[in-house]
């Protein structure tokens, strides 16, 4: 079950405030300049338009912008047709603050200015003096400005935290890959030295002993043959060691644990089967895949937890599965990151499936080499 974040709770609280300030008018306690059913439709339309703008802000920006524009106009009509409703202009504070989430930056100041004019006009329709109307308009101007600036500051802080988390993951992954690359180069260097310095000398020794076997003397011949066996064994051991140095892969569990550890704002659980021991190429592909999955979750999912498991699948290979508790993406469009993950896995003969119907799920299968 997805955990509700503080921003969602604050939005729900603001919605309840809007409903509360409109309830007296809905119950007929305040006189309206239009029939009450008409006013009720305006008020309900305002709430629905605001909710639609919020829900579509990420998935359908143009639709969200249209809903927000409708909400602003409906807010004006709702307030102007109930000039004696007291705190009803709080609805305009809500619409101006909402611009920070669903509209371009320039929209907020424009809406605040227009909302302030509507507040002044509403006060005039309610019979307030010019001074009282001006004071009320100034008060709501300050409230709107403070609310909008607070929202913009919170959005900026969230963006910085997300960028910090992304940089954290990328830095950890780069460190792991760099360390594994350094180890690989060191193994290759040792392998070459073993081959060049020892292998060639033992080969020469074997050739010399081969010649000595054809010399006279039975006793010498016996010892020479034993020495020849030892030399051949040593040569075989050197070649075996060289092959192991070239084939050893970095530790997958340690590498991935380093990548997903202590990510701000995202709880990552990692499970790797004990029988998963892929080669170096597959290991590096899995590390890059996990890096992209975590980065994509931070950047787009709005999730609080991410589960990643890697297991051996008989007859298929190694299967990586990830699932988050974020908003998902029913109409999936692959960005550069997910497309790069797909290409990287397919390059080693694997395949990837994405599912955004409930959270976001990635299933990648790579050969077990």
Image: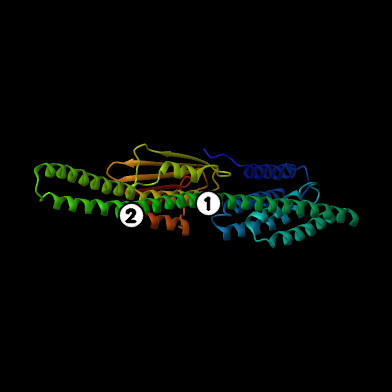
Question: Looking at the image, which residue is at 27% across and 47% down?
Answer: 238
Q: Which residue is mark 1?
A: 171
Q: Is residue 14 above or below residue 63?
A: above
Front residue of 26 and 263: 263
Q: Is residue 221 above or below residue 331?
A: above
Label disc, if present, on residue 192 of the rendered structure: 2
Label disc, if present, on residue 299 of the rendered structure: none
Front residue of 246 and 64: 246
Apparent side of residue 145 relative to residue 158 in the rendered image (left or right): right
SS for tag 2? helix
**Residue 18 coordinates in the image, percent (x, y):** 70, 45
Determine the image quadrant of residue 29.
Answer: top right
Front residue of 241 and 16: 241
Does the image show residue 329? Answer: no
**Residue 212 coordinates in the image, percent (x, y):** 14, 50
Question: Looking at the image, which residue is at 55% across and 42% down?
Answer: 262
Mark 2 and 1 residues: CB-CB less than 8 Å, in contact?
no
The crowd level at tag 2 (other Cα within 10 Å; few <14, some 14-19, many 20+) is: some
**Residue 309 coordinates in the image, percent (x, y):** 41, 41
Q: Which circle, 2 or 1, is nearer the viewer?
A: 2
The crowd level at tag 1 (other Cα within 10 Å; few <14, some 14-19, many 20+) is: some
Front residue of 216 and 69: 216
**Residue 165 coordinates in the image, percent (x, y):** 57, 49
């Amino acid at each position: 079950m997805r955990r509700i974040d503080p921003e969602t709770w604050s939005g729900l609280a603001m919605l309840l405030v809007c409903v509360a300030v409109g309830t007296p008018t809905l119950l007929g306690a305040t006189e309206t300049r239009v029939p009450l059913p008409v006013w009720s439709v305006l008020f309900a339309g305002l709430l629905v338009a605001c909710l639609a703008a919020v829900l579509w802000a990420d998935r359908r920006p143009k639709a969200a912008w249209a809903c927000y524009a409708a909400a602003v106009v409906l807010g004006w009509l709702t307030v102007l047709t109930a000039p004696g409703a007291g705190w009803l202009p709080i609805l305009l504070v809500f619409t101006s603050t909402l611009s920070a989430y669903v509209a371009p930056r320039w929209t907020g100041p424009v809406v605040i200015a227009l909302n302030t004019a509507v507040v002044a006009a509403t006060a005039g329709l309610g019979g307030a003096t010019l001074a009282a109307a001006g004071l009320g308009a100034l008060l709501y101007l300050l409230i709107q400005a403070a609310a909008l600036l607070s929202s913009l500051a919170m959005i900026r802080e969230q963006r910085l935290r997300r960028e910090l988390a992304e940089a954290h993951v990328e830095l950890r992954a780069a460190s792991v890959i760099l360390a594994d690359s350094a180890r690989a180069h060191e193994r290759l260097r040792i392998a070459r030295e073993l081959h060049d310095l020892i292998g060639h000398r033992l080969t020469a020794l074997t050739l010399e002993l081969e010649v000595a076997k054809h010399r006279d003397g039975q006793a010498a011949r016996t010892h020479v043959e034993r020495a020849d066996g030892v030399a051949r064994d040593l040569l075989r051991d050197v070649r075996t060691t060289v092959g192991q140095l070239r084939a050893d892969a970095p530790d997958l569990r340690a590498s991935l644990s380093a990548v997903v550890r202590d990510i701000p704002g995202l709880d990552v659980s990692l499970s790797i089967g004990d029988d998963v021991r892929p080669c170096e190429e597959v290991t590096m592909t899995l590390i890059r895949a996990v890096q992209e999955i975590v980065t994509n979750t931070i950047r787009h999912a709005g999730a609080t937890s991410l589960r990643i498991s890697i297991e051996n699948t008989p007859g298929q290979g190694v299967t990586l599965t990830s699932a988050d508790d974020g908003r998902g993406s029913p109409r999936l469009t692959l960005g550069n990151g997910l497309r790069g993950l797909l290409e990287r896995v397919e390059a080693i003969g694997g395949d990837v499936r994405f599912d955004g119907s409930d959270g976001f799920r990635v299933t990648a299968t790579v050969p077990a080499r």
